[in-house]
Amino acid sequence: MSVTILDHALIQHKLTIMRDKNTSTYIFKQNLDEIAKLMAFEVTRNVSLKDKAIETPVCPMVGKEMDQQIILAPILRAGIGLVDGFRDIIPTAKVGHIGMERDEETLIPREYYAKFPKGLEDALVIVLDPMLATGGSANMAIENIKQRGARKIKLVCLVGAPEGVKAIQEVHPDVDITLAALDEKLNEHGYIVPGLGDAGDRLFGTNE
């Protein structure tokens, strides 16, 4: 597996806006959409292509088109926030959903909802979640998606903690991870430091 940290200037600029506790829900969502678009380019860099014969205004040529179905798998609920940006860039992407709920005392996740389109076994499945904290929810989501037939999976998160990255590496060494930032650590409550708070609350305004 590989871990890719996208240190692009635009991503870091927009992520700083999102980290600011005074940023409104509207601006938070706007910047999340924009970062998701930028991350989509990197994550799909090596998607398989096939030849396609076309005619330009000048002459015939053989171009390229994508030869692999992409399925986005946001982890509910915060993962939904990354879907719009990805679909703006990849409008043909299908979307499945998987709901993972973390027990705030044990920090152990459980699945409470899952629905996916057909074709997981042949698709590139991109699991989306803004935060990679303990890695528990992502690990269980990836495992459950594998059990449904997926063979090629990538995990895309906005902010990750070293503990979460390590957890994924140990359990799913075949899954590549892409982050906008790798932060310092987890605190005693399992939140990423410096992080950006509860991404779901900030995205949907349930902290206001």
Image: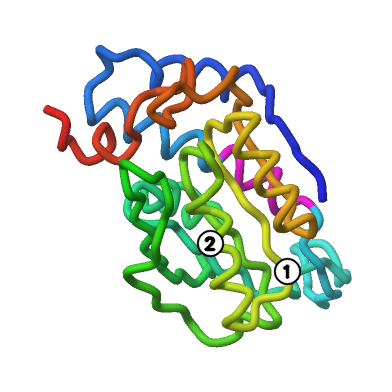
- Reading the chain from its start, which is encountered first: label 2 or label 1? 2
Kindly state the secondary structure of the residue where label 2 is placed: helix
- Location of the C terminus (image quadrant): top left
197 with respect to 55 (left or right): left
Which amino acid, mark 1? Lys
Magenta span: 38-45
CA neighbours of label 2 inside 10 A, class few (<14), some (14 to 19), many (20+): some
111 with respect to 156 (left or right): left
How would you classify the magenta stretch by its main secondary structure? helix
Evaluate whether residue 15 shows in this view: no
**Up/down of 2 relative to 58, above or below:** above
**Front residue (pair 194, 204):** 194
**Up/down of 16 relative to 154, above or below:** above
Residue 42 sits inside the magenta stretch:
yes
**Which residue is found at the position 47% from the left and 35% from the top?**
34
Residue 48 location, x and y as percent?
81, 67
**Up/down of 195 relative to 124, above or below:** above
Residue 81 location, x and y as percent?
37, 46
Residue 17 location, x and y as percent?
40, 16
Evaluate whether residue 107 shows in this view: yes
CA neighbours of label 1 inside 10 A, class few (<14), some (14 to 19), many (20+): some
**Which residue is found at the position 75% from the left and 63% from the top?**
57
Q: Confirm or deny contact between disc 2 and disc 1 (CB under 8 A).
A: no
The CA distance from mark 2 to mark 1 is: 16 Å
Kindly state the secondary structure of the residue where label 1 is placed: strand
Name the residue beneath numbered marker 2. Answer: 140
Residue 152: which numbered mark, if any? 1
**Front residue (pair 179, 113):** 113
Q: Quadrant of residue 42?
A: top right
